[in-house]
Image: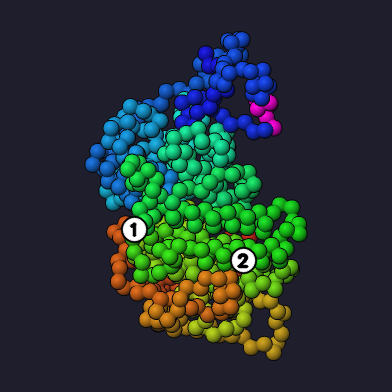
Amino acid sequence: MRRLTLGLSISGENVNSRYFGKSSSMTFMKEAMEYANAPSGSTFEAQRPDFWVIPPFFVPEPVPPQIFPDDDLLQTLLDLYFGQINPITFLLHSPSFRASVANGEHLRDRQFGFVVLTVCALASRFSDDPRVLPTPDSPLHLAGWKWFEQVRALHLITSPDFPWLLKLQLICLSVLFLAGTAVPPECWLLAGVGMRMAQQMGAHRRSRYSVASKIEAELLRRVFWFLVSMDTILSSAFGRPAATTSEDYDVDLPMEVDDEYWDAPHNFQQPTNKTAQATYATSYLKLMEIFNRAQRTIYPVKVGKECGPEAVAELDSALNIWVDSIPSHLRWDSNREGIFLDQSASLYITYYYVQILIHRPFIPIPGKTPVTHSHFPSLAICANSARSCGHVMEVQSRRGGGAVLQPFVITALFDSAVILLLNVWGAQRATLAPSDISRAVADIKKCVDVLHLYEKRWPVAGRHCDTITEMLNRAISRPVSLRPSLKRPVPEDPLPVDPPASTTVQQLEQLELSIKQTDHLFSLPLSTQELGLLPVYESFDFHYDVGQHEPSSSFTNGFSGAEYLQVVNAEQSGFVPPAGGPQETTAAFSWQDWSSFADQDYKWEP
């Protein structure tokens, strides 16, 4: 029989260690008992079994035995997780986790075993070992599913026998695994469940952390902030309200101390001569707070004065202050290598994505009423942020340690490609030179190049590639007379002529060669003002040498420069034109044309 107790436990061994706020009846009762001098941790003796004993059918049925990777593969997967994933997600503590696995804790403690299985599933996406696949002939994007399917059931997470910290860690890892799969809505729901569970145990209140050991409190702090960031990212991606806001919690940021310095003799003291990987988490989470505020301010359900030009200016100012505060070892440097390059790429692509998020609603759309506050150079800011996203991720894919395990990287690349696609349409309507259109297409290609790398392990990236391919095919294959125009055609207007296909291909190849040869002449734009002053339709060059480093074997880039143009042969894997030549479309061109493609990213698939 379980008894109601006033005792609290952060580790979760006490199933009643739940948090109750000031307005709750439980807190009122506790205060009343304290007033009556009832001792802390006392229990109620007058508990009638009919109301307190949990019926057998409330308890989850036993689950099958756990199946772990072979020992050598398990160690390899742990190395991959803590080498490439944990420095970005800052979720687990490497020394204690590895020690528990080495001691066989995952074989004795099923709850910890589930966490280990999820770690293995995530790390499998970075492994070329055929044993990570369900069957030898399975596609690469199924890597890790043989372990994740053992923990996917929600009843494991909601089980009252699951310790709090392990339960929240399992939710976080599951969200991370599901984010790039064919079932992205599931991870959004799971992140919301995780936030509610964290609030249930009081992880959103600073006072809650004082009852735990320092290591346990820091792990819980990492879990909570991970849930905050995932809630922000996924809610933005789906256009839904976040489960929490900064007004709902008062938790300190994670400590800027790397895992190996938590225990004695260092005792959470980072050596002064050792740059901390954990510093990344502080910068990232501060940016997440701006991200969350932008989502609430620019995309409210009830539009009010708070989403006016003053709010946009405040957000721009906050972003400019943030970008100036990035630690020196995380500032963008295209010659940087290792984990600091991956962390830097994560910060900057998030920064540019937030810039797009803020200014995207103010881009003038043909056929629609101009948005108020359109005096912002929103199209220029979005276009140049999109180009920067493509550049940052292209550099990282060539020089980094593989994919950056941030769920919104794929979304950011897709949104950037759509913004740049607007440039293609805008350039056509403005009757700009074919070279300008080719440069815009080259910008899109950068995003698609990286998405093609990710699609091998994250199927949602492949869906985005297909969508962009179809959109670009339609944009560049339609006769000029059928392209949407902002002005009413008059007889005096001469009809522009499309360049021959071969000329377009040659232009793009020459353009890409020119960009690579002049990369060192341009630096990455940072402030909102810089992004707004750069040209909209013309591309721009960046400073990095694309030929010095080859991508890892798991992310080999085998795509040629002109491959993504509509004029390429159908058997190539780039932009493939519809059968029967250029597609005739009507002038009534709208975003609804793409709903059949976009909706596929959010459909539940078995």
Please tell me whether mark 2 sits on a helix, a strand or a loop: helix
Q: Which residues are magenta?
A: 23-29
Crowd class of label 2 (few under 14; some 14 to 19; many from 20; radius 10 Å) = few
Q: Nearer the viewer, residue 178 or 338?
A: 338
Q: Nearer the viewer, residue 185 or 166?
A: 166
Residue 173 makes an appearance in the image: yes
The numbered mark at residue 564 is none
Q: Is residue 24 magenta?
A: yes
Which colour scheme appears in the figure? rainbow
- Of mark 2 and mark 1, the one earlier in the sequence is 1
- In this rendering, would 129 be left or right of 573? left
Figure quadrant of residue 549: bottom left
In percent of width and height, residue 112 lies at: 38, 33
In the rendered image, which residue does mark 2 sit on?
A: 317
In percent of width and height, residue 458 lies at: 42, 52
Q: Amino acid at mark 2?
A: Ser
Q: Amino acid at mark 1?
A: Asn
In the rendered image, which residue does mark 1 sit on?
A: 273
Residue 496 versus residue 295 in the image, above or below: below
What is the spatial separation of the Cα atoms under label 2 and label 1, in whole angstroms? 33 Å
Which residue is found at the position 69% from the left and 62% from the top?
311
Which residue is found at the position 37% from the left and 43% from the top?
267
Which residue is found at the position 27% from the left and 48% from the top?
129
Figure quadrant of residue 368: bottom right
Which residue is found at the position 63% from the left and 55% from the top?
293
